Image (cartoon, rainbow, N blue to C red):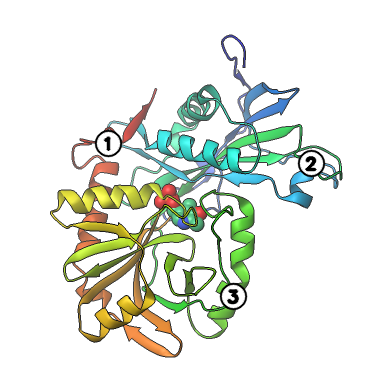
Amino acid sequence: MTGVMEISVTRTNNSRLASTKLENIPFGSVYTDHMLEARYEDGEWKTVEIKPYQAISMQPSMAALHYGQAIFEGIKAYRNDKGDAFIFRPYDNFKRFNQSAARMNMPEVPEEIFIDGMKQLISIDKDWIPAMKDHSLYIRPVMFASDEALGVRPSRTYRFFIILSPTGPYFVNPMRILVEQKYTRAAPGGVGFAKNAGNYGGSMLAATLAQKQGFDQVLWTDTIEHKWLQEVGMMNVFFVIDGKAVTPSLEEGTILEGVTRDSVIKGLNEMGVAVDERRIHIDEIVDAYKTGKITEVFGTGTAAVIAPVKELSYNGFSMTFDPEQYKISPAVKQWLGDIREARSADNHGWMVQVP
Ligand SMILES: *Cc1c(COP(=O)(O)O)cnc(C)c1O
């Protein structure tokens, strides 16, 4: 991008806001009046526009549909009593988006488009942010390969969008989880640390098969031994053992570095709960269960924030937990909610104001 970036703005004269009830909207089912679109061609980001939310047109030969260069992000924004809007940790998602882009051989998106464009878009659709407890505006940036060609090579053109979706509380029933012994989500050297569409596509069969057996999701294990714990569904996983929290470490590149994961680690530290990031073997979990040392198991992610686990099933051995007795995970969820919904001070500089 050369010089100062111009974002052209076309406003709708047909706002749907007045006819939309913002309370308790199910996740990802309603979109705001506007969207942002940027196009990459000839080695640079060219047109950037904010325009009415609308369908996109494409040829059936569009590269992303065939060869899967597609990445995305998930972020939330909040509105306080005074009507000011804040985005939660968008720079962390910006950094991760460009790490995903690099891994998928896609161009980086500049800050002027990802962050400044996002702020401007939200500013236009600010009144769509539900200002109720546990409500937020879900922000979905996405980039995909847009060449209309079937030759196998990195695309030369890309399209980047940001769409916004108001959302109510994401209630998750405590989950029954199957420790997956056949399929894997990510392998060392692969794309597990990137937030690319294919990771989701590749995970759905295992989840569906687990659901047929009465589970809600799977706990992914490593590719080689099926012993080392990875993530629970598409969330990071935490265990509380002997009063200490433990979560899988990131160095193998098979785990998505969750912003919620990082926020929860910082919250636990502030609450005086030690957190260990390291490799976790399933036998350690089974042993700790048998000696009564595991008190909590939960997943973390932007959509649900914290999702409690009530059962882990490993090779026919069922380990059950009682989320009603959980203390640490509800406390850290509250801690995070208080910062995001402005009930307590943001000492970490996590809330980025929308002008
Ligand atoms: C997005 C995602 C997460 C959670 O990341 P957050 O930044 O906390 O939303 C965890 N695992 C996978 C595989 C993901 O795609």
- Determine which quarter of the picture holds residue 47: top right
- Identified at 54% across, 48% down, the residue is 194
Instruction: Residue 121: give its label.
Output: none
The three-letter code of the residue at mark 1 reads Asp
Q: In what element is the residue under mark 1?
A: loop
Q: Nearer the viewer, residue 169 or 176?
A: 176
Per the image, the residue denoted by label 1 is 81
Circles 1, 2 touching at the beta carbon (< 8 Å)? no
Vertical placement of residue 66 versus 36, above or below: below
Residue 89 position within the rendered picture, expressed as x and y whole percent measured from the top left: 37, 37
Select label 2 or label 3 by which is in front: 2
Mark 1: C-beta under 8 Å from nearest atom of ligand 1: no
Vertical placement of residue 176 versus 42, above or below: below
Mark 3: C-beta under 8 Å from nearest atom of ligand 1: no
User: What quarter of the picture does the C terminus occupy?
Assistant: top left
Vertical placement of residue 290 versus 332, above or below: below
The three-letter code of the residue at mark 3 reads Thr
Per the image, the residue denoted by label 3 is 208
> On the picture, is 234 further left or further right than 174?
right
C-alpha gap between disc 1 and disc 2:
50 Å
C-alpha gap between disc 2 and disc 3:
32 Å
The three-letter code of the residue at mark 2 reads Arg
- Identified at 59% across, 31% down, the residue is 108
Mark 2 or 3 closer to N-term? 2
Q: Nearer the viewer, residue 298 or 164?
A: 298
Circles 2, 3 touching at the beta carbon (< 8 Å)? no
Instruction: Residue 153: give its label.
Output: 2
Q: Residue furthest top?
A: 3
**How many residues crowd around disc 2 within 10 Å: few (fewer than 14), some, or many (20 or more)?**
few
Mark 1 or 2 closer to N-term? 1
Residue 260 position within the rendered picture, expressed as x and y whole percent measured from the top left: 36, 50
Q: In what element is the residue under mark 3?
A: helix
